[in-house]
Amino acid sequence: MSDTKQNHKRGPRRRPAFQMRINTKYAPRKVADGQALSCITGSSLTDRQMLDLYRYLKLTRLVEERIVNLYRQTKVVGGVYRSLGQEATAVGSAYALRPDDFITPIIRDLGACFVKGIRPREIFAQYMAKAWGPSGGKDLNVHFGYMEKGFIGPISHLGDMIPVMTGILLGARLQKKDIVGLAYIGDGGASTGAFYEGMNFAAVQKLPLIVIAEHNQYAYSTPTNLQTAVRNLAEKAAAFGISGYIVDGNDVIACYEVTKQAVDYARSGRGAVLIEAKTYRRKGHAEHDDQRYVPDGEIDWWEKHNDPVDRFERFLLDKKIATKEKLDEITADAQREIDEDSEWAESSPMPEAEGAVYGVFDNSIVPPAFRPKVLEN
Ligand SMILES: Cc1ncc(C[n+]2csc(CCOP(=O)(O)OP(=O)(O)O)c2C)c(N)n1
Ligand SMILES: [Mg+2]
């Protein structure tokens, strides 16, 4: 009996069982006692790009500090959610995208918004609910998007932006657009049904979706081990038959490199990727959270030993990519922009009350008879 016949008799060849593949090339590394953490070497980034990354990291930290200041002066409308200690994940990953690629950030990803081209002045205006902010003073301060700059504003419901980004990528494929989508999710959000449905559909359709699961150890006050049984969020990739990566979320270069690899993979048509970024949320869920549920010494340890900005500074100085003076100059320049921009935002107007009726329906197609009086003026 020939081979062909034998195969025919047995039916189609069975595919081997899915092998769990978690790529740990960029995962956190242990260092010898007493040795300070730095960043990975062997990057494809130029020195100029590295200094660009440094500026984005500092800008994120300093803008958030200014927002906290404004919040304490009661000028902010709504809550303030910091990304303190997590800035490298957002900045490094977004830096691996092209300008026409899309992101959907969550509350810890201000740095990704800067990389996508938003200015501090727009952020300050947004937080103070001013008319010149991206959402024109409407909705929650973190609910804003910027289609022209390639980012989709999140809604509050955890997980829901995963199927939304999946839909965007399916739409883009039908329109023959070559874009990649990067969606961020927290460790808590990665336990929602929406996350599973969105990931599953993207995996089946081989859509170019990259999901960065920011494992910052808490969801509100709940430690991760009390809400998911996996030790590594990357293990969830096995449920969808896609590749999972673990990255040191506090190493900005590792975050760039792992995302770059995932972007190249997704763009070449091989499908979705799940990246788990191991990091730590040094502030409470929001400014009003006093973190009394955090064990003593934990936050101090991360601040002292694993701060993403300190690590990158150490790297840039050790590798002689920049001098201390150069880094101070970049910081002063970012600070200058922040001072100018927060002043601009403070002096900008509050929205007109009538504006509330716009942006809900497409007012250009509402028949005049049904238009509220206010739209006729
Ligand atoms: C479906 C859903 N459940 C609960 C909430 C309430 N909620 C808002 S933020 C949050 C914690 C989010 O934690 P995580 O996903 O780990 O993100 P992190 O804040 O740590 O970045 C919760 C439970 C929500 N917004 N949506
Ligand atoms: Mg979390």
Image (spheres, rainbow, N blue to C red):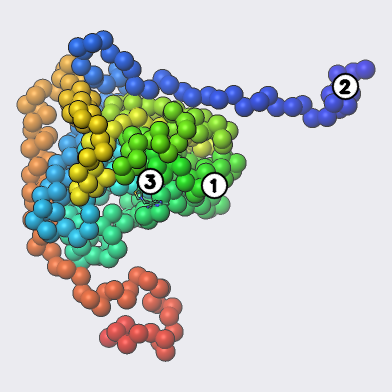
Q: Spatial distance from mark 1 to mark 2, Cα to Cα?
A: 39 Å
Image side of residue 238 versus residue 211, left or right: right
Point out the residue furthest to the right here: 1
Q: Which residue is mark 1?
A: 197
Q: Which residue is mark 3?
A: 103
Amino acid type at circle 1 is Glu
Secondary structure beneath label 2 = helix
Alpha-carbon neighbours of circle 2 within 10 Å: few (<14), some, or many (≥20)?
Answer: few
Q: Spatial distance from mark 2 to mark 3, Cα to Cα?
A: 50 Å
* Among the two numbered marks 1 and 2 on one chain, the one whose residue lies closer to the N terminus: 2
Q: Indicate which label's residue lies in the foreground, 1 or 3.
A: 1
Image side of residue 200 versus residue 359, left or right: right
In terms of image quadrants, where is residue 125?
bottom left
Amino acid type at circle 2 is Gln
Secondary structure beneath label 1 = helix
Vertical comparison of 279 with 195: above or below: above
Amino acid type at circle 3 is Ile
Q: Is mark 1 within 8 Å of ligand 1?
A: no
Alpha-carbon neighbours of circle 1 within 10 Å: few (<14), some, or many (≥20)?
Answer: some
- The residue drawn where x is 19% and y is 60% is 77
Q: Circles 2 and 3: CB distance less than 8 Å?
A: no
- The residue drawn where x is 23% and y is 10% is 33
Vertical comparison of 364 with 138: above or below: below
Vertical comparison of 108 with 143: above or below: above
Q: Indicate which label's residue lies in the foreground, 1 or 2.
A: 1
In terms of image quadrants, where is residue 213?
top left
